[in-house]
Image (spheres, rainbow, N blue to C red):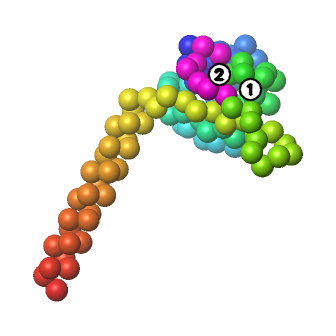
Amino acid sequence: MSIGHNIKDKRLKKGLSQEQLANEVYISQATLSNIEKGKSIPDILLLQHFAEALECSFEDLLENESVVVNNNNQQGGIGYAQVVNQLSEKLIEQYEARILEKDIRIKELEQLLKVT
């Protein structure tokens, strides 16, 4: 099960609609739908909001997900959890597309500078 599936499962068990849960964690229903479908991955802060809204532990949402949780805090004081997740193919594709777009824009600017 993915994080999104875990969120959906807990949302349904709690009897919440996507719209209700999305409102509780201050995101759009479309964003929640994408998370539940595995099209996007929530960041650490949003995961904490989901855990609070669904009255479960942070770890419950990460169940059966390939993650590393690091509770070491180099700054002292409050312990911060950092979640390192394997990038999905979708995120890799988006990253590669952004790099390609950047390279194209650089070439366009280089051409513009040569003309002037």
Residue at 32% in and 43% down: 96
Extent of the magenta region:
62-69
The residue shown at (65%, 21%) is 62
The residue type indicated by label 2 comes to Leu
Residue at 69 percent of width and 32 percent of height: 70
For the C terminus, the image quarter is bottom left
Q: Quadrant of the N terminus?
A: top right
* Residue 27 in sight in this render: yes
User: Residue 16's spot in the image, x, y percent?
Assistant: 72, 23
Q: Residues within 10 Å of mark 1 (few under 14, many from 20)?
A: some
* C-alpha distance separating marks 2 and 1: 7 Å
Q: Amino acid at mark 1?
A: Phe
Determine whether 59 is above or below 24 in the image: above
Residue 20 visible here: no
* The disc label shown at residue 58, or none: 1
Residue beneath disc 2? 62
Q: Quadrant of residue 64?
A: top right
**What is the secondary structure assignment of the residue under circle 2?**
helix
In contact (CB < 8 Å): disc 2 and disc 1: yes
- Is residue 64 part of the magenta span, yes or no? yes
x, y percent for residue 39: 46, 30
